Amino acid sequence: MSMVDWSKLPDLGAVAALTAAFASVARHSHAPVSRLWLTAWIMIALHFAASMFLFFPGAWATLAQFIVLASLTWAGILFMWASIPYRKQLSSLCMLAGLLLANTLYIGILVWFDSPGWLLIPAALLFAAIPLGITLLSMRSFIHPLRWMIVAIYSGLTVFLLIFQGRPGNGPDLAINAVLFSVFLGCCLHFWYMYRRRTAGAFITITGFFAWASVFVAAPLVAGLQPGFKLESEVWNLPKYIVAVGMILLLLEDQIEHNKHLALHDELTGLPNRRLFQDRLASALERARRTKAHTALLVVDLNDFKRVNDTLGHHVGDQLLQRVGSLFAGRVRRSDTVARTGGDEFSLILEEPTSRADAEFVGRSLGQLLREPLQLGNRLVQVGASIGVAIFPDDAQDMESLCIAADLRMYAVKHADSGLTQYAAPAPSREFIRRSEFPPGR
């Protein structure tokens, strides 16, 4: 009689196929979580592979059982950790290591010791002590609702284990199911918190994790209430496949959104590109026509940018563009638009309330930023700017004419080398200064 449980082979094949499909999607995904999710799915495949050897004699069966349970737990913890936005924080890495340690230690004691006795008590207390300790120690520098969610889940697990783990007969089974339920309930809650969007991928993944956690409650209840009732293993494994499909959809949805973003934004600076800029300018002018308001267009051309590229290299030029884009975006209101519309050209749309004086105030502010040397790594780079300003409807009645007017004034400034704009510079309105977001003293 074969000691290998070949009945698990279809499950292993199905998960392996899903993992391969997931790997194919993850390879083309920009999302960093895709690699972590893939690692977790490899753990799930290991879980099914080890389950084929549970009927081996002696220590081999014990080792297989440990791998079955530990790999499933590790996968769930990786799913949780991958879904949080602060996973690179030191306290988050400590939480990951602590949860892996607590779960592995508890499972190891249950599997390797026939009568663990008192060893289970400190092991169960670790489930609450580690998350609570890390959370309290890191509270001064960092706190997040998900961190307290982990504390609550594992504190509840500790209470349950202390009550039921020593129960004669089915105590160890209840303990293992409680550990796995806590892990995948945590996955469900983490994904619900981080993917609160109305998409098929989010709904399927969250529902799948909830069903996955529910298996560890439903299976013991069915066994206890209806001992003669048997469900095929495929029924209990169905939530795993649901989660896999949901995660693939999440990656595809994120990739579609990323592609849409790239189509409308400059890849280097992250600012709107010329296409999105033209759409926003057209919308701004239409709103100005309806409300009989003013809209300002500023065209900014960096001086000596070619010299920076030629002498310091294109990588420094790229750093300069990124820095300038960040500075400009921080100097306008949220209702305004900063776009990169050329190699070394930026354009700004200032919407109501604005005036010629307000626009020139912004222009002078941007020019002053670029008169100061910029720190790029270990280099100081200094560039100036030529800025042209055009006001709708005073200088032009349509978008094309407004862009031409701003360009001509920018080139006039560049050729005259007169500094900023060709306008006189009256003081900006108080309303504009009040509503602008210029940091004081800059």
Image (spheres, rainbow, N blue to C red):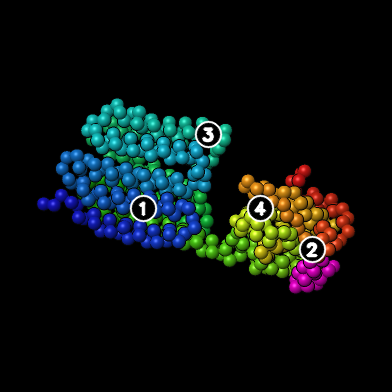
Under circle 1, the secondary element is: helix
As shown in the figure, which amino acid type bears the numbered disc 4? Arg
**Which region shows up in magenta?**
394-413
Q: Which residue is mark 2?
A: 414
Alpha carbon of mark 1 to alpha carbon of mark 4: how far?
Answer: 39 Å
Residue 424 visible to an observer of this rendering? yes
Mark before the other along the chain sequence, 1 or 4? 1
Determine whether label 4 and label 3 are within 8 Å by CB.
no
Foreground tag (4 vs 3): 4
- Would you identify the image quadrant in which residue 167 lies? top left
Under circle 3, the secondary element is: loop
Kindly identify the residue that appears in the image at 32 percent across and 33 percent down: 164
As shown in the figure, which amino acid type bears the numbered disc 2? Lys
Determine whether label 1 and label 2 are within 8 Å by CB.
no
Q: Which residue is mark 4?
A: 323
Determine whether label 3 and label 2 are within 8 Å by CB.
no
Alpha carbon of mark 4 to alpha carbon of mark 3: how far?
Answer: 32 Å
Choose between 1 and 381: the one closer to the eye: 381
Q: Residue furthest left?
A: 1
Q: Which residue is mark 3?
A: 138
Residue 262, position as x, y percentages in the image: 57, 63
| Classed neighbour count for the residue bearing mark 3: other residues with Cα under 10 Å, few (<14), some (14–19), many (≥20) | few
Foreground tag (3 vs 2): 2
Mark before the other along the chain sequence, 3 or 1? 1
Residue 362 visible to an observer of this rendering? no
Residue 31, position as x, y percentages in the image: 49, 55
Choose between 192 and 283: the one closer to the eye: 283
